[in-house]
Image (cartoon, grey):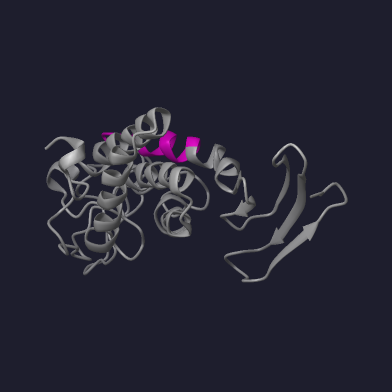
Amino acid sequence: LPVREQTTVAGHAVRANYLSAGAADVAAETGDEELLGALATQWDNTVARRTYITGGQGAHHQDEAFGADFELPSDRAYSETCAGVASVQFSWRLLLARGGAHYADLIERTLYNVVATSPSSDGTAFYYANTLQQRTPGEPADPDTPSARAESSLRAPWFDVSCCPPNVARTFASLASYLATTDGAGVQLHQYAPATVRTPLDGRAFADFAVATEYPADGAIIVTIGEGSSG
C-alpha cells in the first residue's frame, strides 16, 4: 500500500521504520499535514498492537518482519537491534513535528531495553535479535565463527550479517541530540542523563541548565538553572 493508505507499520521491521522516518522528514519539510497524520496513526497502531513491552519490534524471524496485530510471542521474538534503532529515528521525527511526550517515552523504553542491552558490558559481543524469553539455556558462540543471526540465543562476537554494531555505535554517538528540544513555549527535556544545556530560545531568552542523575539506576533527577538563563 502507499504510505498514505497504511494504518500500521508493516513488513521488514527495520526498513519499514526507516521508510516511515523518511516520510516524516518529507512531511515536515513540505508541510504535508495529511502525510504526517497518516504516519502518526501508523505509529499509534504499531505501538499499541505490534510492539513488545521492551519497545522491541518485529515478531517474525522470517523476513525480519512485523507480525499481525497482537502477534507478540515472547520466546520467538525477533526484535532486531536495528529495528529498535529505526524505531527511535521514527519516533524522534514525530516528536519534533508534533511534540507529544509519548514519542519520547517510546524512545526511552527502546533505548534502554533494546539498543543499550545489545552489546555486552565489555563491548566484545552483541545481540542481533532480542528475544524476551529463553526456554532452554543457549550455547556460547564460537568467537572465531560468525553466528547465524536467526539461531543464536546469546550475544555473539560476530554474526553473518553485522549491521547492528555500527548502528548501535552511531546511535550512542548521537544520544546528545535526543535529550532536549526548544519551541515557542520554551525548552523541553525528553531524556534523563547528566547534561548541560545552553541554547537561545526566541531571540529574547536563553536557556542554561544542568541535569544531574544516575537514571535509570536511581530515579532522582536534579535540574539546576544556570546564571545565564533569561526570559
Image: 143 above or below 136: above
Identified at 41% across, 41% down, the residue is 89
Q: Can residue 146 be seen in this view?
A: no
Which residue is more in the foreground, 133 or 231? 231
Tell how many labels: 0
Return the x and y of residue 144 as percentages of the image width and height.
34, 37
Q: Does the magenta stretch include residue 10?
A: no
Q: Up-down: is 70 above or below 171? A: below
Quarter of the image with the N terminus is top left
Q: Main secondary structure of the magenta part?
A: helix
Query: Nearest the camera: 132 or 13?
Result: 13
Q: Position of residue 62 (x, y in %)?
A: 12, 46
* Residue at horizontal 29 percent and vertical 56 percent from the top: 44
Query: What's the magenta region?
Result: 160-170
Residue 60 in view: yes
* Left or right placement of residue 103 versus residue 161 in this view: right
Q: Position of residue 120 (x, y in %)?
A: 46, 51
Residue 190: name its quadrant: bottom right
Q: In which quarter of the image is residue 139?
A: bottom left
Locate residue 229, reporting x and y percent: 81, 49
Q: Is residue 165 magenta?
A: yes
Q: As rendered, which of 90 and 136 lies closer to the eye?
A: 90
Between 182 and 231, the one nearer to me in the picture = 231
Does residue 87 sit above or below 32 in this rendering? Answer: below
Residue at the spot 24% in from the left edge and 57% down from the top edge: 45
